[in-house]
C-alpha cells in the first residue's frame, strides 16, 4: 500500500472552518439509490462534513480517515462513529454497508485497493459514490485573480494528485454500474474575509508558506479587494460538483 500523504493535518481546524457545505440534494439522492439506510461508510472523511450530512439519512455512519488530527477536529454526532484508518483497510464487516462515499478525497487513495475494499464491505446491490470539486467562481474579476494565485503562484506547490481533481476523476478507474445523478453545485454567500480564508485552506498555499516563509495572499490582497469591491459585501461563491455513482 502506498504511504499516507497528509496535506491537511497541520491546519485541520482551519480546513474545517473554511470549507463549503455539500448540497442536501446530494445526500437525499444517494440515500434513494442505496438498497437500505442502515449503514454508510464515509471513507477519507476528513473533518466529517459529509459524514454529518449522511447521518440525516442513515442509521449509522462509519467515518474513517488516516489523519488523527482531522478525526480529532471532526464534529461529534450520535449516529456517526469515527475511526482513524486508511481507506484501503477499514474495520467494517464483509457485506455490511449500504453506501460507501468519498468526498473530495479519492485522489489520495490507492484507488484499486480502495475499490476492492468497497466491494468487500458493500451489501449486494450496495452503492458507491465518489465526488469532488475544483475551482470556484465569483465574478470574472475575482476569478482572474484567483486563477493567477492557483496557477502562476502555486503551480509548483500542488501535489501531483491534484491533477485527478482537475480532470474530474475521469482518469481514475470506476468498475461499477453507473447510476444517474442530478447536476449539483455548492453555493455560499461570503464576504471577502471568508473567501480568502477558503483560499488559505488550500494545501498548496500552506506548502508555499512553509517553503518560502511568506503568505501569497498578502501580495494579492489589494487585487482581491479591487475585484471584490466592498470587503463586507456578501457575494455568491459557487463550485460545480462532479459526482460518479455506481452499484
Image (spheres, rainbow, N blue to C red):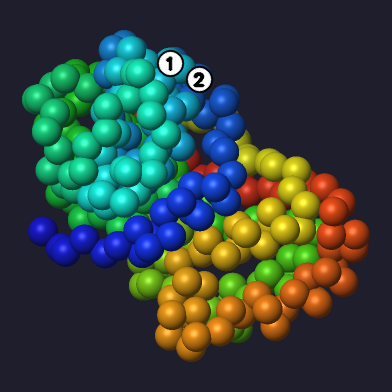
Is residue 174 at least partly visible in the picture? Answer: no
Q: Residue at the location (84% across, 59% down)?
A: 231
Judging depth in this view, the residue of 55 and 179 nearest the camera is: 55
Judging depth in this view, the residue of 97 and 194 nearest the camera is: 194
Q: Name the residue under label 2.
A: 28
Query: Looking at the image, how many numbered discs can be counted on the residues?
Result: 2
CB atoms of marks 1 and 2 within 8 Å: yes
- Compared with 212, 45 (above or below) is above
- Compared with 149, 34 (above or below) is above
Q: Which of marks 1 and 2 is nearer the N terminus?
A: 2
Q: In x, y percent, where is residue 39?
A: 27, 18
Q: Name the residue under label 1.
A: 57
Q: In x, y percent, where is residue 208?
A: 48, 80
Q: Residue at the location (39% across, 39% down)?
A: 74
Q: In x, y percent, where is residue 240?
A: 61, 47
Label 1 element class: loop
- Compared with 132, 193 (above or below) is below
Amino acid at each position: 500500500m502506498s504511504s499516507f500523504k497528509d496535506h491537511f493535518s497541520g491546519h485541520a481546524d482551519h480546513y474545517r472552518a473554511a470549507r463549503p457545505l455539500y448540497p442536501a440534494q446530494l445526500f437525499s439522492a444517494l440515500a434513494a439509490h442505496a438498497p437500505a439506510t442502515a449503514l454508510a461508510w464515509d471513507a477519507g472523511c476528513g473533518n466529517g462534513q459529509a459524514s454529518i450530512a449522511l447521518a440525516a439519512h442513515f442509521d449509522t455512519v462509519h467515518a474513517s480517515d488516516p489523519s488523527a488530527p482531522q478525526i480529532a477536529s471532526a464534529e461529534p454526532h450520535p449516529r456517526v462513529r469515527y475511526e482513524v484508518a486508511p481507506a484501503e483497510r477499514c474495520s467494517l464487516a464483509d457485506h455490511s454497508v449500504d453506501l460507501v462515499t468519498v468526498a473530495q478525497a479519492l485522489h489520495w487513495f490507492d484507488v484499486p485497493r480502495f475499490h476492492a475494499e468497497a466491494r468487500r464491505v458493500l451489501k449486494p446491490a450496495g452503492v458507491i459514490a465518489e465526488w469532488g470539486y475544483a475551482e470556484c467562481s465569483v465574478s470574472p474579476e475575482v476569478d482572474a485573480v484567483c486563477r493567477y494565485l492557483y496557477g502562476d503562484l502555486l503551480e509548483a506547490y500542488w501535489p501531483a494528485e491534484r491533477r485527478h481533481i482537475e480532470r474530474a476523476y475521469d482518469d481514475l478507474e470506476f468498475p461499477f454500474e453507473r447510476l444517474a445523478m442530478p447536476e449539483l453545485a455548492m453555493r455560499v454567500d461570503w464576504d471577502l474575509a471568508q473567501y480568502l480564508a477558503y483560499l488559505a485552506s488550500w494545501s498548496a498555499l500552506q506548502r508555499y508558506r512553509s517553503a518560502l516563509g511568506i503568505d501569497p495572499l498578502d501580495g494579492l490582497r489589494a487585487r482581491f479587494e479591487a475585484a471584490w469591491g466592498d470587503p463586507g459585501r456578501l457575494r455568491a461563491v459557487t463550485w460545480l460538483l462532479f459526482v460518479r455513482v455506481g452499484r
